[in-house]
Image (cartoon, grey):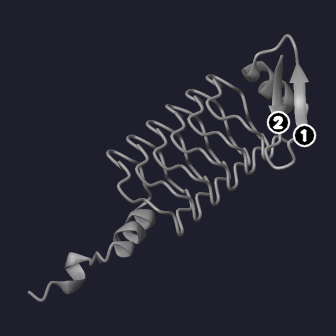
Amino acid sequence: MSKIINRKTEEIIIENENLSIKELVEKAVKKGISLGYAYLDDADLRDCDLRDANLYNAYLDDADLRDSILCNADLRNANLDGAGLYNADLNGCNLRGANLDGAILEGVNLESANLRNSDLSYADLRRADLRGADLTGSILYNANLYKCKFNQDQLENLLKAQGIEITNKKENDNT
């Protein structure tokens, strides 16, 4: 029997004897059932359609979410420590305050995502698209940002946060 438990209240959110956890999660999302505080550590959620899912404060440690669609999903304060999100679509996703420490976000679409105050320490963000994402207060300690896509203002703000100031050479050229 597959069931999803609310980690805060210990109550069963949804259960079914014939469905896998992946099928159960997709069914809950389609029905608009909130999966806030859901315990989904190590869950195999590859290729899941979780558009507009309500997963705030969910526990998704080491979950496999590669190639999943999480557009506009609510993952505020979710724990995605070590989660695998290869090539997932998180466009417009709310990850405010989420723990993504050590998460694999390679090739992920995070355009217009809210990553305010999220922890991306040691995250693998190679080739991730972060254009338009709100990174205010995010922790990027030892994150791999190889070939990430940023808007110019995002890049300038990230560099300023590291104490590096960009000046326009033409303005400072005294010749």
Residue type at tag 1: Glu
Left or right: 142 as drawn, with respect to 139: left
Q: Is residue 132 visible to us here?
A: yes
Name the residue rendered at 52%, 62% in the picture: 135
Q: Residues within 10 Å of mark 1 (few under 14, many from 20)?
A: few
Marks 1 & 2, CB-CB < 8 Å contact: yes
Left or right: 8 as drawn, with respect to 71: right
Which residue corresponds to mark 1? 11
Residue 75 percent across, percent down from the top left: 70, 49
Say above or below: 165 vs 121.
below
Say above or below: 154 vs 1.
below
Dot 2: element: strand
Left or right: 27 as drawn, with respect to 83: right
Say above or below: 48 vs 130.
above
Residue 20 percent across, percent down from the top left: 76, 16
Dot 1: element: loop
- In the picture, residue 96 is in which quadrant? bottom right
Q: Is residue 32 visible to us here?
A: no
- In the picture, residue 174 is in which quadrant? bottom left
- In the picture, residue 46 is in which quadrant? top right
Residue type at tag 2: Ile
Which sits in the foreground, 80 or 68?
A: 80
Quadrant for the C terminus, please: bottom left
Which residue corresponds to mark 2? 5
Q: Residues within 10 Å of mark 2 (few under 14, many from 20)?
A: some
Name the residue rendered at 74%, 38% in the picture: 39
Quadrant for the N terminus, please: top right
Which sits in the foreground, 130 or 75?
A: 75
Name the residue rendered at 26%, 77% in the picture: 168
Badge 1 or badge 2: first in the primary sequence: 2
